[in-house]
């Protein structure tokens, strides 16, 4: 009986949301809508904590930053409305729910950049969700963010899953951060910040086992010098409320602006994957046909940049329903100064 229970535990503990292959030959198509291609996205770690990805493709646990250190040193991205492009799926009860999304940036030209608060070379890449109503009717928000601060007294960067209670202005209680390498911008710079909403069925106990849902939020950053991840609890229920995603490369936090020197141009891809109904386990595809219904030009963040669109309008493309990435939609835009 104990052996049977162990087998059942393993089977039931499988993640039931994210549908992302571990290997793929696809890359983002920057040709503005000829076809949709999705890059090789590493799946998130399964447990709360902080990680780096080894050369063999395994997640290796590394220390997370303390709440005290984050409060004292890391400027939280703040809510507001800025010139940030995003994808929307609607907000009604039957609208598709996003389960994974990413923001990818690729520089074409680069001449320099300064953050209006945090100095030379400081910037963030934000993958931001919509705001939503959480427990106790509080307004909540999640940001999957890489923040680079090379001009600090001791240069550092952070990768964070920001889990925010906007109503009480609590940015820190449920946020998880780690320190990846500092990354300098250049004409060859490219990076991708991915957000995952993962919900799992877990069985616990032996004499009187019980089943419950476990929800987590993962930020995975594909940076020039490595791949890193932080996993935080889904404290406010994003898994039932994620209908939009926006982001690009902007100021570090606190409403700052990334000011780029001319000539600079960058291509941004904002992509999302959705499911109307959850599959039983992660090996089962989402139901096809959940295309993004629109894109928008005023994303939810107070940080910004001084770049203007070079090609208008941005291009929104959704995948062929017959493909393995049938539930992905990608918004591409190019901006510069």
Image: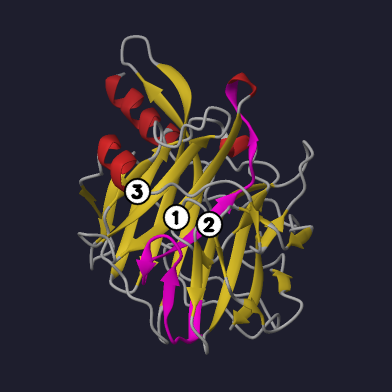
Q: Residue at x 56, y 57 (%)?
A: 101
Marks 1 and 2: in contact by CB < 8 Å?
yes
Q: Quadrant of residue 182?
A: bottom left
> Badge 3 is on which residue?
74
- Is 217 above or below relative to 207? below
Label 2, label 1: how many angstroms apart (C-alpha)?
6 Å
- Is 78 above or below relative to 224? above
- Is 204 above or below relative to 329? above
| Lateral position of residue 5 relative to residue 287, left or right | left
Q: Is 11 in front, or is 118?
A: 118
> Badge 1 is on which residue?
145
**If you read the primary sequence from the N terminus, does the residue marked by circle 3 or circle 1 appear first?**
3
| Lateral position of residue 1 relative to residue 35, left or right | left
Residue 63 coordinates in the image, percent (x, y)? 20, 45
| Lateral position of residue 305 relative to residue 321, left or right | left
Label 3, label 1: how many angstroms apart (C-alpha)?
12 Å
Q: Residue at x 79, y 57 (%)?
A: 293
> Badge 2 is on which residue?
127
**Highlighted magenta segment, given as a residue range:** 106-135
- How would you rate the neighbour count of disc 1 (Cα within 10 Å): few for under 14, some for 14-19, many for 20 or more? many
Marks 2 and 3: in contact by CB < 8 Å?
no
The answer to whether residue 145 is visible is yes
Examine the structure image and report whether residue 113 is included in the region drawn in magenta: yes
Residue 113 coordinates in the image, percent (x, y)? 43, 76
Marks 1 and 3: in contact by CB < 8 Å?
no
């Amino acid at each position: 009986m104990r052996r049977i229970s162990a087998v059942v535990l393993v089977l039931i503990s499988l993640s039931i949301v994210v549908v992302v292959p571990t290997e793929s030959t696809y890359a983002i198509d920057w040709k503005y809508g000829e076809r949709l291609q999705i890059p090789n996205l590493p799946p998130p770690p399964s447990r709360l904590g902080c990680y780096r990805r080894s050369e063999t493709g395994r997640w290796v646990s590394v220390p997370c930053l303390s709440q005290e250190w984050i409060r004292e040193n890391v400027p939280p991205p703040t809510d507001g409305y800025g010139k940030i492009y995003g994808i929307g799926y609607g907000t009604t009860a039957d609208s598709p729910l996003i389960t994974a999304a990413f923001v990818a940036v690729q520089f074409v030209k680069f001449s320099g950049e300064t953050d209006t608060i945090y100095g030379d070379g400081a910037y963030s890449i934000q993958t931001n969700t919509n705001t939503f109503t959480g427990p106790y009717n509080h307004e909540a928000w999640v940001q999957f963010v890489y923040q680079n601060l090379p001009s600090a007294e001791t240069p550092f960067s952070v990768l964070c899953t920001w889990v925010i209670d906007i109503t009480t202005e609590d940015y820190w209680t449920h946020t998880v951060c780690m320190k990846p390498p500092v990354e300098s911008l250049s004409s060859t710079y490219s990076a991708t910040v991915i957000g995952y909403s993962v919900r799992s069925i877990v069985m616990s106990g032996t004499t009187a086992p019980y089943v419950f849902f476990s929800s987590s939020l993962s930020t995975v950053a594909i940076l020039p010098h490595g791949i890193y991840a932080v996993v935080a609890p889904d404290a406010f229920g994003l898994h039932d409320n994620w209908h939009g995603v926006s982001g690009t490369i902007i100021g570090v936090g606190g409403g700052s602006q990334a000011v780029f020197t001319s000539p600079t141009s960058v291509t941004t891809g904002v992509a999302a994957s959705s499911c109307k109904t959850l599959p039983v386990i992660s090996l089962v595809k989402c139901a096809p046909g959940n295309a993004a219904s629109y894109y928008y030009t005023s994303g939810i963040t107070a940080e910004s940049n001084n770049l203007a669109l070079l090609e208008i309008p941005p291009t929104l493309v959704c995948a062929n329903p017959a493909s393995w990435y049938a539930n992905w939609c990608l918004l591409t835009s190019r901006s510069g100064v």
